[in-house]
Image (cartoon, coloured by chain):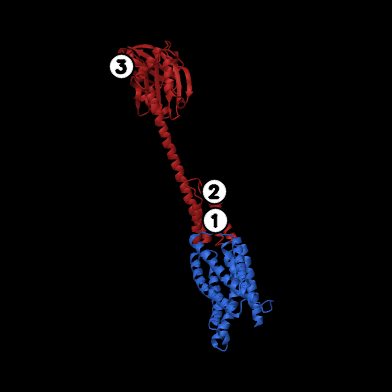
Chain colours: A blue, B red
Amino acid sequence: MEMFQVVLALFWLIAGIVSFYFSIGNARVWTSIAVGFFLILLGEIIPGALPFLPGLGNPYVLAMGHIIGTLSILIMSHGFQEYYVFTRTLEFEGSKLHVYLGVVSVIGASLLFLLINPTPDAEVLRVLRIVENTNWVFLSLINIDLIRKIYLNIKDTPISNGFACFMVVFACIFLWKGSQLYIDVFSLDTKQDLINYTISHYTNLTGNLLASISVGGTFLYLGKLLR
Amino acid sequence: MILLPRGNPVKENINPGKVNLADALGKMRQGKFTGYMRFDFPEGTGVFIYQEGRLISGLYETEREHLIAYDAIDRTFHEALTGTGNLNIYRLSTELAYSIHTLLHGEMLHKGQDLQLIDIKSLLVRMREEKRSGCLRIYSKEHIALIFYRGGNPLGFFHDGSTDIETTADSSLSVAKEPGAKVDVLVTIGDSEKSLADLMQTADVAGLWSNAVAARRLQREEQEHAASKTLETREADRRQKTLALFQQLAQAHLGKIGTSLVEKEFDKMKLNGSQINDSVLDGFYRNLSKSARLVAGPSKIDKMLEEMKRGFNGLPK
């Protein structure tokens, strides 16, 4: 299992690097989306997938992992909304620097919020994880619908197939985060003998793997389309 | 075409469009001028005859029209202001000025008769027998000569460069000998020399001139307006063609959204009827490139812009 986590981490590392690089080299509209995907690497994989990393047991690191994970889906959803508005109005504003600074500020503010409050215990971390996964699950569904609309608006452009790939990405993320939410809501991790847990667990791992591969692949494909 | 021999030239080849003719006519009057002003226009010819400062005759003639007096002055003023005419002023003797007047207002008995075909002797005999007053106008491509008659008797000759009626027929006869020479026979009815009115006394020449100037100004304004309308229409047409071309290319490279992007960036140029050119389009290309980067890569966008520039340069100016 540890080997699988390492492979996952590797895929997410590749996906994170590709998406971050993509955010730098392309139009402003991609910044929020690409930074959002990059944050998955920071928020989810670094603290969660690598048991060898120092500080894993630190509740602040874990709490920040969940918070950054939540910010990740919020930021990328915001990016897709911006893109959708652009396809409808052809209007777009803002700068990349503002996006980067905004993201760093929100992460900083979240850390400050954690530090001025009592040290997060297991229950707090569980609640944060549920909040994070809930956001991921429902925003993934919303994003699939939003991306479908974007796709219809730009279906004859060079970039349109890239959006079709994003729908696949969010389908994988839905499986990944949805199965985790299911486990948390029904506390299935305390009832591991149930088939529900087994299915959810493997769905979670498969979804996670497919999401990491599809995210990296999608950004590489987008990079090719936007050459 | 009014055929008159040139008298003693006072001024030649003046553009009457650059002269205040009301003032000029006034100066002729003050200077007790005797002679005629000849205005040649593409459409016709105007002649003003002065006798000792009195404007005794005005004539304006085209192929279809024969205007006299005030109508002739008015029309000449209007034509002069188009700037396409040529004004020549010739001095004559008092008697000759009158003769020219009677010649211009006389009745044409024969017109353009070829001298080789006409029996000139019998014509002269008939003039004498019928006691005709008038003029034989003999002309070739180069020269004109007039032979004046009064009461059937020859009065004298007038040819290019004369200021008075001459008694020698040399020049006149030499014109008759030139190849293709023709003759007009004009006769005058009665002798109205004493009753000739000064048109400048009875006509408001300054008023006619002011009206002509105002009409010309209005005409010019209308022409300018029409020209600017034409230019506007042509520019609008060019803008439309440019927009259609750009939309077509954007559709090919960026799809449907490309058409909308072009339309939007085109609107942003706020041309408002002004001319569309490369420098105006630079901003358009820049903005379109920026917005197109949301749906396509730089290489595709550059190719599209390149085609747009080529296509625009290929549009008719």
Q: Residue at x 42, y 32 (%)?
A: B217
| In front of the other: A208 or A55 | A55
Q: Position of residue A133 (x, y in %)?
A: 55, 76
Q: Amino acid at mark 3?
A: Ile
The residue labelled by disc 1 is: B288
Residue at 66% x, 82% y is A2
- Residue topped by disc 2: B280
Task: Give amino acid for label 2.
Answer: Val
Position of A88 relative to B10 (above/below):
below
The residue beneath circle 3 is: B189
Which comes sooner in the sequence, label 1 or label 3?
3
Callout 2: residue from which chain? B
Is residue B176 shown to the viewer in this render? no
| Tag 1 secondary structure | helix
Q: Chain of mark 3?
A: B
Along the polypeptide, which appears first: circle 3 or circle 2? 3
The picture places residue B159, in percent across and down from the top left corner, at 44, 16
